[in-house]
Image (spheres, rainbow, N blue to C red):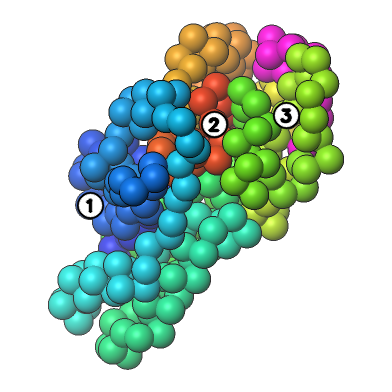
Amino acid sequence: MANVRIVTDSTSDIPESVRKQYGIEMVPLKVHFGAETFYDAVTIQPDQFYDKLTSSATLPTTSQPSPADFLDVYKKLGTDPETEIISIHLSSALSGTYQSAVLAKSILDSNTNVSVVDSKSASYGIGLLVVEAAKAAKEGKSRDEILAQLEKLRQETRIYFLVGTLDYLQKGGRIGKAAALFGSLLNIKPILTIDTEGEVSSVDKVRGSKKAMGRIIEMLKADFGDRKLHMTVAHAKTKESADEFTELLRANFNIAEWTFTDVGPVIGTHAGPGTVAAFARPAP
């Protein structure tokens, strides 16, 4: 029976303890503050990043891993000829990370079997795919079974998020289809998602954070009705808002499983502090 291993990148925002639990390999993206370079989730963690972001005179930039970075991981895992690799990455509409992984695969010896998956998502939208793939691999499921499961999961998952300001998305060039919202309308909170093409898109806009959270509850009810859900809440240096959001979700849905995580440095560079997000999918 083939041994399936799961690879991702640092934008999946999976806590290190969970990566270790399921044997998930992670290739980091980089964050640059001027001449200083940090490896996302390796040499800089979320708290350090947001502290540095608020005190820095210039906005950080990010860069994707090189094909060589992926090649090193694929070769390490591929020393066992029975190993098959599923490599799941940040939306290709938001980054060249997926393409770097594809190029690495093309360089590999043909004996190493790698499937590169465009998550068409970001943050724990990737993370939940990765964790479920790793669980399935541990259960002994085949590569094809896991890939089919990932496609189903991607279609079932709903993502809604609020940002503190659209400035970071706009300056980083990741605002996608939400570009028309850019401006300074007083206290208007756009409700954003990652659409089926993997781009940032607006689904609604309301006045004030509390009303925006309430509107997300309404949309999730329309999406899932009374079904049991697996729910993840992620935030970027805004724990108070995340706690408030969690209580609203807890009061309105039957949650079979919770996950809480931080929006990491690379995603945080583009979304900015103040971001809070919900990632929901039906429980099995």
Which is more foreground, mark 1 or mark 3? 3
Q: Secondary structure at mark 2?
A: loop
Rendered location of residue 274, percent (x, y): 55, 22
Please report whichever mark, 1 or 3, sits nearer to the chain's N-terminal start. Answer: 1
Residue at (38% x, 53% y) in the render? 29
Rendered location of residue 258, percent (x, y): 44, 25
Residue type at the position of mark 1: Gly
Residue 191, numbered circle? 3
Residue at (38% x, 62% y) in the render? 65
Which is more foreground, mark 2 or mark 1? 2
Q: Secondary structure at mark 1?
A: loop
Which is more foreground, mark 3 or mark 2? 2
Pointer 2 residue: 272
Query: Which of 155/243 is in front?
Result: 243
User: Do labels 2 and 1 touch, CB within 8 Å?
Assistant: no
Label 3 crowding class (10 Å Cα cut-off): few <14, some 14-19, many 20+?
Answer: many
Residue at (64% x, 54% y) in the render? 198
Query: Which of 224/98 is in front?
Result: 98
Residue type at the position of mark 3: Ile
Q: Say above or below: 183 vs 243.
A: below
Which residues, given as a range, are shown in magenta?
202-215
Residue 23, numbered circle? 1
Q: Say above or below: 129 vs 148.
A: above
Residue at the extreme bottom: 110
User: Could you tell me how many numbered marks the image carries?
Assistant: 3
Q: In the rendered image, which quarter is residue 212 located in?
A: top right
